[in-house]
Image (tube, rainbow, N blue to C red):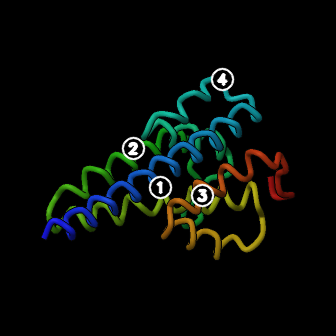
Amino acid sequence: MNYFMAMAMDDIYVYATLGILAYVLSSVGLYKLAKRENISNAGLSWIPICNYYITGLLLKGRFTIFNIKYYNPEVALPFFAVVVLIGSQIPSFGLFLSIGAGIPIIASIYHMILKYKGTQVWIWTVVCSLLPPAYALFLFGISIKGNVSSNS
């Protein structure tokens, strides 16, 4: 019995370490991208929920969902992130709330990939939406490369 409990604790340590690493990589990536685009409060990329504010500023002027243009994604994205968090705590109805509010979050991933990568956008959006560490690696990778796609 103790063997299985120890094995489960090992898994928790591995997942926690991977989660922290993904958080640091995505924060560093967003921070560097914000600095590169002269966003004055780039340090907010280190604060959960506020990092969606930085993402919104990076996407300002190009953020659309179902052909509806959002002129202030820096306000909308943190709001939707909070709704996803709250919705995930509410039984049954919260699932629909989280899915609905998650659409703009996935759209932000799509637009970030479109802006900074420009190729195979849909494939990368699906991968990064299903595997958040992949999105963290994407953000970190584009922040060190320094190149921006021709779609920006």
* Residue 68 picture location, percent across and down: 56, 59
Amino acid on which disc 2 is placed: Phe
* Tag in front: 4 or 3: 4
CA distance for labels 4 and 3: 24 Å
Q: Where is residue 38, by image quadrant?
A: top right
* Residue 11 picture location, percent across and down: 34, 63
Amino acid on which disc 4 is placed: Ser
- In the foreground, 7 or 76: 7
CA distance for labels 3 and 2: 16 Å
Amino acid on which disc 3 is placed: Thr
Q: Which mark is residue 18?
A: 1
* Residue 90 picture location, percent across and down: 17, 58
The residue positioned 31% from the left and 61% from the top of the image is 98
Q: Which mark is residue 79?
A: 2
Q: Are marks 3 and 2 in contact (CB under 8 Å)?
A: no
Return the disc, 1 or 4, that comes first in the chain's sequence: 1
* Tag in front: 4 or 2: 4
In the rendered image, which quarter contains the N terminus?
bottom left
CA distance for labels 4 and 2: 21 Å
Secondary structure of residue under mark 3: strand
* Tag in front: 3 or 1: 1
The residue positioned 63% from the left and 56% from the top of the image is 137
